[in-house]
Image: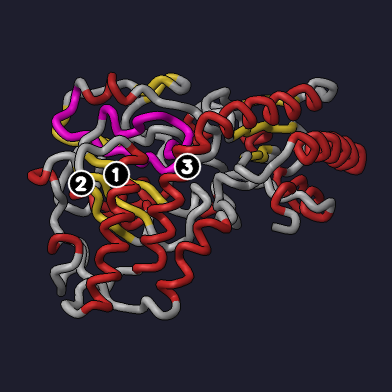
Amino acid sequence: MLGWDRYFDNAATTPVDPRVLNEMLPYLGDEFGNANSAHSWGSRARSAVELARTRVAEAIGADDPSQILFTSGSTEANNWVLRSGATGYVGPFEHDSVRAPAAHLGFNVLENDGWLVSPVITDFASHMLVNNETGAIFDLEGLRAHCKTLHSDITQAVGKLQNPIGHVDLASLSSHKIHGPKGVGALFVRDPSQTPLPLLMGGEHEFGMRAGTLNVAGIVGFGLASSLSGDHREATWSQALEWREIQLEAVRGLTDVEVHSMGVPHILAMSFLGVEGESIVLDMDAAGFGIGSGAACSTGSTEPSHVLTALGIEPDWIRGTVRISFGRYNTKESSAALAANLVDVVTRLRRLRN
């Protein structure tokens, strides 16, 4: 846990909770059985998978564990839904794992006025619940009233919002955003008749809907991480509010600062005019702090953030954007140190540029 309190890029990924790791370890050792095998080794693995399925279902408010289909993460779940033959609309602020297949398959993009998205009457729409770059929360109830089937990427809402599947038919989520292991996630399907066509074929895994030997250890970790995310939800929300305010108070002494959303308090996106976000990230890293310059999946891209572009933010402001995202292991002390160093870094970079 060395340095975990100074890691503020939890929207990209989170450290695995030690309790989760301990729960996983037997399934990386003696309990190595294939969950689809009929013998006792397989039976024990299968029981562990079904317990995890129940835990994930309970954590997001699903009515039945059978509504949870395990995947390798939200990216697979998003692609699974969009590639299932549906056509319709996607939101303007989506993660690239929605945007890329949607563009490839010819989906339309919903129009927006700022953060307000205009619904249209359609058979299918996909729209995230919480934006991964800014933490903005969207009104899915309004969208749901206009479409026959609504899918949502709820990755950044799990463990933050209660009942994140309240208005959706299909939902994608990932383990590694809630202090679980990487490489595992799920697709929630409210009604079996809405289950997408199999993306992976060649086996009867996951009710015949997703072929491939199950990642038992990862699924076990995902299950416990889901339960713990609910247990910690209220505490981490109030802590994130406090830690966010520490950052906002610190930057009030700087000029040319823009905050892009005040949605879930766990994600804070700010732009500093006259400096490069990547330079801030690197200098903060040298000072011992981990923050992000946008969506982790887009790091290294020369294209400006499509989220901020859709909001009409000028390119000079977009270039100076950083994302601070809080997690379970941050503290008030480390948040105060982060804020002080951030002000120093921005001030120094601006001085060097002038």
Residue 226 position in % (x across, y down)? 42, 47
**Which structural element holds mark 3?**
helix
* Label of residue 229 in the image: 3
Q: Residue at x 75, y 27 (%)?
A: 246
Q: Which residue is painted at 31% across and 50% down in the image?
A: 78
**Most distant residue in the front direction:** 40
Task: Specify which label sits upstream in the sequence, 2 or 1.
Answer: 1
The C terminus appears in which quarter of the rendering?
top right
Instruction: Using the numbered discs, state the Cα–Cα distance from disc 3 to disc 2 in whole angstroms.
Output: 19 Å
The answer to whether mark 2 and mark 1 are in CB contact below 8 A is yes
Give the mark nearest the N terminus, 3 or 1: 1
Q: Is residue 28 above or below residue 145?
A: below
Q: Residue at x 48, y 55 (%)?
A: 180
Magenta stretch: dominant SS?
loop
**Residue for badge 2:** 67
Query: Is residue 354 visible to us here?
Result: no
Q: Quadrant of residue 230?
A: top left
Q: Amino acid at mark 3?
A: Ser
Magenta stretch in the rendered image:
146-167
Label 3 with label 2: CB-CB less than 8 Å = no
Return the mark for residue 57.
Answer: 1
Residue 161 lies in the magenta stretch: yes
Instruction: Count neighbours of disc 1 (C-alpha within 10 A) and say few if under 14, some if 14 to 19, many if 20 or more.
Output: many
In the image, is 124 to the left or to the right of 49?
left
The answer to whether marks 3 and 1 mark residues whose Cβ atoms lie closer than 8 Å is no
Could you tell me which secondary element the residue under label 1 belongs to?
helix
Residue 113 marker: none
- Measure the C-alpha gap from mark 3 to mark 1: 12 Å
* Circle 2 SS class: helix
Q: Quadrant of the N terminus?
A: bottom right
Q: Answer few, some or many: residues within 10 Å of disc 2's Cα (few below 14, many 20 plus, some between 14 and 19).
A: many
